[in-house]
C-alpha cells in the first residue's frame, strides 16, 4: 500500500510580515524561512510523516538548488530515486504571511515544467500504487498520462488543481477524487462557463456543496471543497453531503495548510478509513500546520495528529 505523487519541487522562501507590502514599499520581516517545498513535495512529505509509503516523480534543475533535492527527500524519509534531473533552473517560490495568518505567494515552476509523459511511462511504481496524486505545479501532459495509466491499471486518482488553470479535456473523466479550495472551485466553475458558473461566491458550506455536486457530474466520484475557517464539504456519488467544521486554532501561517489537508485525506482514504474520519483527520492536519511557521517541519506525524485529535476542543491550540 503506497501513494504515487506526481510531484513538484521548489525552494520555498517565506517572510512573516505585519501586513502585505504595497507597491514600492519595503517591509521589515518578523520571521523568514527557506525550505524545500512545492505542493507535490508537501503532499509526499505529509503522507510520509503520517506513516504512508510514498513513490513518485520530482523534476529539478542542474543548478545549486537542484543539488539540495536529494538531501531534502532523504531527510523526509523519501527515496531520492524519485528525482529526475533536468537542464535549467529548479523551481522556487516566494511567499508573504501577514499577522492574521493569511498568505500570498508567487511560484516559478522551473524544472517542474520539464516533467514529461515519458517520465511517467517509465515510472514502474505508478500502476502498483493505491492512489495516484497530482497537482498543477507540473504541466498537463504528465498528469493526463499518469491518470490514464492509473485508470487502465485500476488505480484511483486524486487531483488538486492548484494553482488553478483550465483543465485539459478528458482529465476529469480519469479523476476519482477532486480536492480544491473555495477560490479554485469558483475558478473551475468559471472556466466551464456557462455549464456551471452561477456567479455566486463559494463562501458558505451550502454554496460549496452545490458546486461540488455539480462537479460530480463531470467524472469524479468524490469532490471535496475546503473553506478555510468554515471547514470543508465533501460530496460523493449516491450519499448525503458531509460538512467537516474547522478546528479552532490560533492561526500563525496558512502556507501549506491546504497541502496538509490533502495529504491527510489521501492517507486516510488509502488506509480504508471512512470518509467522515478521513475529513476529520485532514482538517486536523490543516489546523496543525496553520498553527506553526513553515511547512515541511510543520506537517504532523501520526503521533502528533493523534495527540491533537485526543485533546478536548478547548485545548487544540498549537
Image (spheres, grey):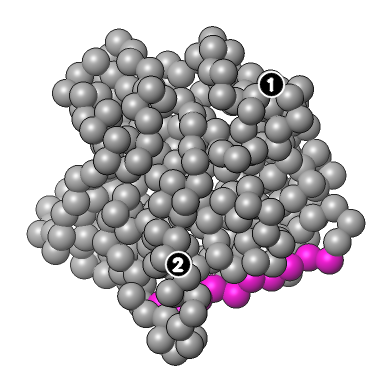
Disc 2 crowd rating (10 Å Cα; few below 14, some 14-19, many 20+) is: some
Residue, disc 2: 305
Classify residue 134 by image quadrant.
top right
Q: Secondary structure at mark 2?
A: helix
Does 92 sit left or right of 196 as displayed?
A: left
Left-right relation of 55 to 15: right
Local packing at callout 1 (Cα closer than 10 Å; few below 14, some 14-19, many 20+) is: some
Q: Position of residue 308 (x, y in %)?
A: 44, 74
- Whichever of labels 2 and 1 marks the residue nearer the N terminus, that label is 1
Where is residue 279? Give x, y as percent.
Answer: 62, 64
Residue that label 1 marks:
149
User: Which corner quadrant holds the N terminus?
Assistant: top right
The image shows residue 41, relative to residue 291, as above or below, that is above
Residue at x-position 78% and y-position 65%: 241
| Farthest right residue in view | 238
- The quadrant in which residue 15 appears is bottom left
Give the residue at x 63% y 61%. 278
Residue beneath the point at 32% across and 22% down: 60
Given this view, does label 2 or label 1 mark the residue nearer the observer? 2
Which span of residues is magenta-colored? 240-249
Query: In front: 204, or 137?
Result: 137
Q: Quadrant of the C terminus?
A: bottom left
User: Callout 1: helix, strand or loop?
Assistant: helix
Residue at horizontal 80 percent and vertical 40 percent from the top: 218
What is the CA distance from the residue labelled 2 to the residue labelled 1? 33 Å
Amino acid at each position: 500500500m503506497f501513494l504515487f505523487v506526481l510531484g513538484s519541487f521548489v525552494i520555498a522562501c517565506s517572510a512573516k510580515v505585519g501586513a502585505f507590502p504595497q507597491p514600492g514599499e519595503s517591509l521589515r520581516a518578523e520571521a523568514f524561512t527557506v525550505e524545500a517545498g512545492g505542493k507535490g513535495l508537501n503532499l509526499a512529505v505529509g503522507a510520509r510523516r503520517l506513516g504512508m509509503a510514498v513513490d513518485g516523480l520530482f523534476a529539478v534543475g542542474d543548478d545549486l538548488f537542484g543539488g539540495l533535492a536529494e538531501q531534502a527527500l532523504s531527510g523526509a524519509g523519501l527515496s531520492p530515486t524519485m528525482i529526475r534531473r533536468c537542464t535549467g533552473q529548479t523551481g522556487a517560490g516566494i511567499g508573504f504571511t501577514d499577522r492574521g495568518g493569511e498568505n500570498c505567494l508567487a511560484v516559478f515552476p522551473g524544472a517542474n515544467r520539464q516533467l514529461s509523459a515519458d517520465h511517467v511511462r517509465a515510472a514502474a511504481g505508478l500502476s502498483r500504487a493505491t492512489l495516484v496524486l497530482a497537482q498543477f505545479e507540473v504541466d498537463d501532459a504528465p498528469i493526463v498520462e499518469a491518470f490514464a495509466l492509473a485508470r487502465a491499471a485500476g488505480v484511483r486518482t486524486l487531483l488538486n488543481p492548484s494553482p488553478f488553470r483550465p483543465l485539459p479535456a478528458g482529465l476529469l473523466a480519469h479523476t476519482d477524487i477532486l480536492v480544491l479550495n473555495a477560490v479554485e472551485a469558483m475558478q473551475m466553475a468559471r472556466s466551464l462557463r456557462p455549464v456551471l458558473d452561477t456567479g455566486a461566491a463559494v463562501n458558505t458550506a451550502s454554496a460549496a456543496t452545490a458546486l461540488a455536486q455539480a462537479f460530480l457530474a463531470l467524472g469524479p466520484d468524490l469532490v471535496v471543497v475546503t473553506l478555510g475557517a468554515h471547514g470543508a464539504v465533501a460530496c460523493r456519488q449516491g450519499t448525503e453531503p458531509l460538512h467537516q467544521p474547522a478546528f479552532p486554532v490560533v492561526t500563525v501561517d496558512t502556507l501549506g495548510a491546504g497541502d496538509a489537508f490533502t495529504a491527510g485525506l489521501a492517507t486516510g482514504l488509502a488506509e480504508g478509513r471512512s470518509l467522515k474520519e478521513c475529513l476529520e483527520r485532514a482538517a486536523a492536519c490543516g489546523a496543525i500546520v496553520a498553527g506553526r511557521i513553515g511547512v515541511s517541519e510543520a506537517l504532523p506525524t501520526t503521533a502528533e495528529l493523534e495527540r491533537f485529535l485526543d485533546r478536548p476542543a478547548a485545548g487544540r491550540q498549537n
